[in-house]
Amino acid sequence: MSSAQILAAKKQEILESWFQATVDSYPAETARFIKSQKDPFANPVGQATYRSLEALVEALTAGHGREVMTTALDPILRIRAVQTFTPSMATSFVFSLKQIIRQHLPGDGRDADVDMNALDRQIDEMAMAAFDIYVACREKIYELKATESRKQFFGSLKRAGLIDETAADGPGF
């Protein structure tokens, strides 16, 4: 049995454990809600997280590259970027996958005829992609906040009659 076949056989167990570990990174009250609420409309964070993790496990077992992993990581990291996670907390769920896989394979993967070094490299690549996505999302948030602050500032000056209307309508406004 190949590495891919061994992982594919344990895919659902790995996914469920990874989802639990990822949800447990949230505050206790939030984690309870995400775990218990199955309605996708009442719990979009839980549904997006589960779907992203499912796509990532599938990409890992199929041996897909960074592009597929990036697409799967994007929704979960967009959510985590607007929450109170630090960068390390927001992306740490990826690293937890290494231990989860080892827990589900015979002999922590040593007895399963799985190339754990190659798997670890794939997960490391996934983590780097996750960090890139998280940083890009945070940059966009700060950019939007700065633009909104400028608009409010110039709007206040305009309403106070302290600047000419044409000056407030400068580039980007």
Image (spheres, rainbow, N blue to C red):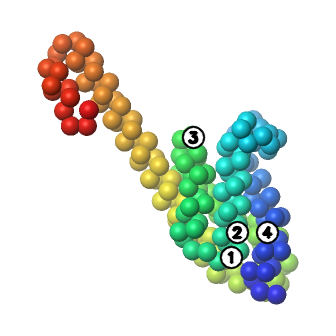
Disc number at residue 62? 1
Using the numbered discs, state the Cα–Cα distance from disc 3 to disc 4 in whole angstroms: 29 Å
Indicate the amino acid at tag 4.
Lys
Indicate the amino acid at tag 3.
Gln
**Going from the N terminus, do you reach mark 2 or mark 3 first?**
2
Kindly identify which residue carries mark 3. 83
Q: Viewed as shown, does residue 82 lie left or right of 27?
A: left
Residue 97, compared with residue 87, is above or below; it is below
Q: Viewed as shown, does residue 22 lie left or right of 86?
A: right
Residue 5, compared with residue 12, is above or below; it is below
> Residue at 44% of width from left, 42% of height from top?
141
> Residue at 60% of width from left, 60% of height from top?
72
Q: Secondary structure at mark 1?
A: helix
Residue 148, compared with residue 112, is above or below; it is above
Asked if the residue under mark 4 is in contact with the one under mark 2, i.e. CB atoms within 8 Å, the reply is yes
Using the numbered discs, state the Cα–Cα distance from disc 1 to disc 2 in whole angstroms: 6 Å
Q: Residue 44: x percent and y percent?
A: 68, 42
Q: Quadrant of the N terminus?
A: bottom right
**Going from the N terminus, do you reach mark 3 or mark 4 first?**
4
Circle 2 packing at 10 Å, graded few (<14), some (14-19), many (20+), is many
Q: Secondary structure at mark 3?
A: loop
Kindly identify which residue carries mark 4. 11
